[in-house]
Image: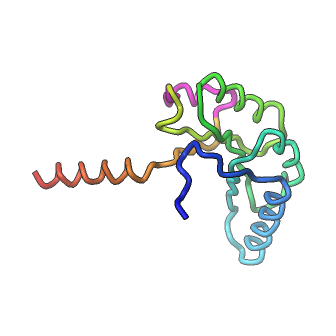
Amino acid sequence: MARPAAGEHVGHTVPEDINYTQKVLSEIAQANNLPDKVLNPAPVRPEHAAGQAEHRGLSHVQVVTDMDGWGSQALKLKHYEWYVHDTLIEYAGIKLFFRQDIPLFTPEEVMNMDPAPDVINLPVDLGMMLSAARQAVRLIAI
């Protein structure tokens, strides 16, 4: 089965799955004396974000809620503000898509969001990465 490309609908995560996963991660970390873990479930649909309140406060696992999705800056800012200000989340994240977000936020624009995201997720296009690697190899060979 081919991996979906960025921008294709691949489903969503529901609070029950996040809560269960966080509970299991917390138990593993505690039982094995491991450092805290980060859980970054994505995508979380806006109508499900409110149900995530249950997983807040479990020890050993910090949960990042990504504002996932691609589109205009205005739409992404609106959704980011909704997630950060109107829902109960532990840490705020935003996912930026190099090809679908037009124009792409600059680093300054991202850090000026209120509040600035705790996590910035930049999915890498494997084809783009391989092309850059081939170019680098050609430059080294010269």
Q: Position of residue 61 (x, y in %)?
A: 75, 59
- Side (left or right) of 6 relative to 31: left
State the predominant SS element of the stretch in magenta: loop
Residue at left offset 72%, top offset 44%: 91
* Image position of 32 with respect to 76: above or below: below
Q: Nearer the viewer, residue 84 or 123?
A: 123
Q: Residue furthest front?
A: 1
> Does the magenta segment cover residue 111?
yes
Could you say where residue 38 lies in the image, as x and y percent from the top left?
Answer: 68, 57
Q: Closer to the camera, 14 or 114?
A: 14
Is 140 located above or below residue 73 in the figure? below
Q: Outermost residue, bottom direction?
A: 32
User: Which quarter of the rendered picture does the N terminus lie within?
Assistant: bottom right
Please report the residue visible at 73 percent of the width from the left and 54 percent of the height from the top: 62
Specify whether residue 5 is painted magenta.
no
**What segment carries the magenta color?**
103-116
Q: Colour mode?
A: rainbow
In-image side of 75 versus 89 (left or right): left
In this picture, residue 134 sits left or right of residue 110: left
Q: Residue at x 59, y 26 (%)?
A: 72
What residue lies at 70% left-to-right and 53% top-to-bottom?
Answer: 41
Q: Position of residue 76 (x, y in %)?
A: 65, 29
11, above or below 61, in the image: above
Residue situated in front as seen by the camera: 32 or 114: 114
> Residue 5: percent from the left, percent from the top?
53, 49
